[in-house]
Image: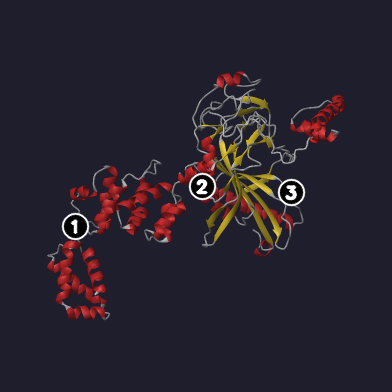
């Protein structure tokens, strides 16, 4: 571990490149299926095999997905788009080039706000978001003489989200990735699964003395397939670079891979070749012009995002920040909660139900389905029963809810009746008794108001007596205190 | 424009081609001639002319996101100079 005093001499500069695989059903420039886990070379086409005379044709949905991401990141959308050829000779793309957007990225600029653990907020400025095609896979270790080529992935639509070099810690990188993953999931344009490679992150890292005028040499880290690994790899790389410089060595601009088992980054042995991609506009694809009308229709199709719902939950439903944060974490939960709030006005109670019994129940499910087995309208009914004092919360969550989850479609009231757990008293029948008791003891009420809170036990005893023991003690006590407070 | 040895070697490397020593001189000459011939175009004044990136004057030629299959794995592999049951085979590539 580096000494704080040494570390403090340096400024860390990090830029990220995030590739998100778009969840279209067909590829970006040809019509074969994009599906994973199939046997090798089954999702291929004459276009991706680079057969002579074949022409690419842009998947409209891929472009729209990219625009959606740009819109929610406040990017400027390019109205005139061409694609460029990035030329390199390698068997993962038989054409000899990758189609990408060099000159006219579909989205320019924009930003993604992040919140750090200490509550600090920061806007991560984007350089661009552009569309490109993925390459095929090469397998080197199955044959001693040959490398094997699987082109199933070739031509899969990607967006590459490129930040400006504005991040300075691994925590910021993790927060950025978490936010990006949430956005693509809410937009439903990418499944956001890093382990399976649908969301990939490369990090460019450099260090410089705090008073230095120029950036240090940047090192690119690849092969980090979870947010945790991105954090680990960045932390390791920052230390490595500082140690190198402290020893008087200079940093080599190179690509390094992250090794999960050792937690270290290592340089690739082959000497870095001079890359010269000789970008030029692809003459096979016609330009794409995004009209005002088209852009507006995409804008109108944008779903509610986590930040929209967060705002609604706090401002309209009066929920605490914490609740809103937890509830909007996953789209499924957030949308369920939103529907729940159309059915009950007990928003905070509904939130407690989501974070308590519902979450606990989902954890007990063995299958991965995140679908909540009780429809919002039924859960709302159950919440209202509890809030009306007809059912205690513990009985509702431990006895009624599991039955509702099993027998979908039955009403909460029916189940409570069958289980014989309904409390006899409700606000309507309790209030007259409470009022009667209070009116009978003006002297005691005055004592209570002057600070003798303990006297409430006497009132309670009286209420229980007059209700012939049928009152729900919890509800009666609540109603009694409320009544006394407002006197 | 004169193509020098360095440029020739660079082009050969980028296209993964091997150039025989005895052919190098001739190739540099040929490439220089081609560039000079195409270079004629530089004489045209193109001020204010937008670059032409596509030969047709169409735009927004796109397809809907619908799956269609145009070649089977078997047919695709048939075209390959080297293959096994599932894969195309290429000379050993190591990153």
Q: Which of the 4 image quarters holds residue A355?
A: bottom left
Q: Do circles 3 and 1 both sit on a common chain? A: yes
The image shows residue A113 at horizontal and vertical percentages of 54, 55
Q: How is the image coloured?
A: secondary structure
Label 3 or label 1, whichever comes before in sequence order: 3
Q: Callout 3: helix, strand or loop?
A: loop
Is B74 left or right of A312, judged from the image as shown? right
Is A263 or A291 nearer to us in this picture? A291
Q: CA distance from mark 2 to mark 3?
A: 31 Å
Residue at label 1? Answer: A423
Name the residue that disc number 3 marks: A252
Chain of the residue that carries numbered disc 3 in the rendered image: A
Location of residue A50 in the rendering, given as x and y in whole percent from the top left corner: 63, 26
Q: Nearer the viewer, residue A282 or A51?
A: A282
**Whole-number angstrom distance, CA of label 3 to CA of label 1:** 74 Å
Query: Which tag, 2 or 3, sits closer to the chain's start?
Result: 2
CA separation, marks 1 and 2?
46 Å
* Label 1 vs 2, first from the N-terminus: 2
Q: Quadrant of the C terminus of chain A?
A: bottom left
Q: Residue at x 54, y 26 (%)?
A: A42
Q: How many marks?
A: 3
Pick whichever, A433 or A112, lies toward us. Answer: A112
Q: Chain of mark 2?
A: A
Dot 3, how many residues are within 10 Å of its Cα: few (below 14), some (14-19), or many (20+)? Answer: few
Label of residue A181 in the image: 2
């Amino acid at each position: 571990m580096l000494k704080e005093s040494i570390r403090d001499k340096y400024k860390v500069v990090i830029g990220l490149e995030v590739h998100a695989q778009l969840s279209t059903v067909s590829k970006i420039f040809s019509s074969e299926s994009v599906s994973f886990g199939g046997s090798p070379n089954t999702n291929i086409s004459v276009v991706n095999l680079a057969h002579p005379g074949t022409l690419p044709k842009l998947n409209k949905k891929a472009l729209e997905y990219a625009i959606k991401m740009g819109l929610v990141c406040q990017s400027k959308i390019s109205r005139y788009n061409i694609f460029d050829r990035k030329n390199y000779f390698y068997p993962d793309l038989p054409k000899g080039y990758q189609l990408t957007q060099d000159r006219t990225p579909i989205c320019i600029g924009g930003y993604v706000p992040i919140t750090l653990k200490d509550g600090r907020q920061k806007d991560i400025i984007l350089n661009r978001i552009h569309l490109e095609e993925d390459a095929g896979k090469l397998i080197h270790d199955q044959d001693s003489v040959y490398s094997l080529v699987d082109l199933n992935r070739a031509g899969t639509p990607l967006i590459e989200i490129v930040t400006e070099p504005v991040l300075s810690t691994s925590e910021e990188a993790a927060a950025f990735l978490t936010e990006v993953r949430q956005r693509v999931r809410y937009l439903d344009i990418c499944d956001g699964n890093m382990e399976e490679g649908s969301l990939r992150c490369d990090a460019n890292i450099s260090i410089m003395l705090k008073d230095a005028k120029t950036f240090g040499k940047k090192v690119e880290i690849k092969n980090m397939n979870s947010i945790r690994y991105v954090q680990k790899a960045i932390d390791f790389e920052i230390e490595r670079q500082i140690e190198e410089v402290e020893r008087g060595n200079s940093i080599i601009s190179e690509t390094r891979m992250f090794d999960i088992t050792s937690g270290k980054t290592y340089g690739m042995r082959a000497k870095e070749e001079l890359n010269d991609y000789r970008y030029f506009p692809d003459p096979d694809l016609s330009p794409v012009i995004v009209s005002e009308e088209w852009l507006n229709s995409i804008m109108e199709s944008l779903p509610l995002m986590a930040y929209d719902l967060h705002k609604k939950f706090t401002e309209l439903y009066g929920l605490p920040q914490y609740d809103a944060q937890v509830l909007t974490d996953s789209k499924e939960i957030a949308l369920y909660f939103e529907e729940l709030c159309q059915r009950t006005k007990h928003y905070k109670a509904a939130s407690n139900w989501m974070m308590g019994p519902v979450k606990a129940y989902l954890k007990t499910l063995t299958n991965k389905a995140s679908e909540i087995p009780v429809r919002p309208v039924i859960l709302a009914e159950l919440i209202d029963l509890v809030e009306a004092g007809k059912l205690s919360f513990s009985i509702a969550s431990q006895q009624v809810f599991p039955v509702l989850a099993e027998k979908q479609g039955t009403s909460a009231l029916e189940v409570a009746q069958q289980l014989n757990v309904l409390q006899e008293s409700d606000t309507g029948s309790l209030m007259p008794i409470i009022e009667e008791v209070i009116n009978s003891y003006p002297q005691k009420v005055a004592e209570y108001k002057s600070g003798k809170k303990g006297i409430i036990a006497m009132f309670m005893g009286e209420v229980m007596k007059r209700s012939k023991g049928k009152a729900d003690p919890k509800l009666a006590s609540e109603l009694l205190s409320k009544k006394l407070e407002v006197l | 424009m004169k193509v020098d040895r360095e440029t020739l070697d660079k082009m050969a490397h980028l296209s993964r081609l091997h150039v025989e020593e005895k052919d190098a001189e001739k190739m540099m000459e040929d490439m220089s001639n081609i560039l000079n011939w195409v270079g004629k175009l530089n004489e045209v004044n193109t001020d204010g002319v937008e670059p032409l990136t596509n030969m047709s004057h169409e735009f927004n030629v796109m397809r809907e996101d619908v799956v269609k299959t145009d070649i089977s794995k078997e047919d695709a592999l048939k075209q390959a100079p080297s293959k096994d049951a599932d894969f195309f085979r290429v000379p050993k590539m190591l990153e």
